[in-house]
Image (cartoon, rainbow, N blue to C red):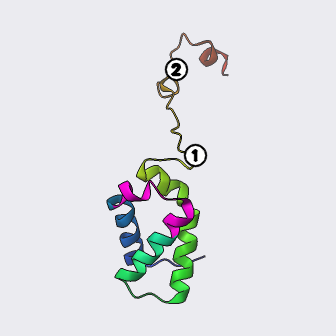
Amino acid sequence: MDYYDSTLLRILWGLVESHAYFLRELSDDAIILWLLRTVQDRVCITSEDSQNLRKYIAKRICLIRDIIGTSRAGLSIPVIREHLTAPSAADPMVNSIV
């Protein structure tokens, strides 16, 4: 299990939120590189921490894309409201569940 310094994580996620407008325009690789270099500019970290942070960012690139408001393909996933409401007793699917 990798260890992540909470200070590094706070800086990282703060950068994601505060620079969303900028990060939206970058590729996944560019986002990883920019976030890593920006964290390194703010805090002196070891090469091991740098490697771990790079892996951490790469594993969470989909979450980062979600936070900054874009998906990997630039498409948004629509929310289907019918699945968000509770089923009614009149719904045949509810009555068929035993």
Outermost residue, left direction? 18
Q: What main secondary structure does the magenta stretch of the protein show?
A: helix
Image x and y of residue 73, in percent: 58, 46
Confirm or deny contact between disc 1 and disc 2 (CB under 8 A). no
Q: Secondary structure at mark 2?
A: loop
- Image position of 93 with respect to 5: above or below: above
Q: Nearer the viewer, residue 14 or 29?
A: 29
Image x and y of residue 82, in percent: 51, 22
Q: Which image quarter holds the C terminus?
A: top right
Identify the disc placed on residue 35. none
Q: Nearer the viewer, residue 59 or 74?
A: 74
- Image position of 57 with respect to 21: above or below: below
Q: Is residue 75 magenta?
A: no
Tag 2 residue: 87
- Residue located 40% across and 88% down the image: 44
Q: Label 1 amino acid?
A: Ala
Around disc 2, counting alpha carbons within 10 Å, would you say few (fewer than 14), some (14 to 19), or many (20 or more)? few
Q: How many marks?
A: 2
Q: Label 2 amino acid?
A: Pro
The residue range painted magenta reads 19-32
Around disc 1, counting alpha carbons within 10 Å, would you say few (fewer than 14), some (14 to 19), or many (20 or more)? few
Tag 1 residue: 73
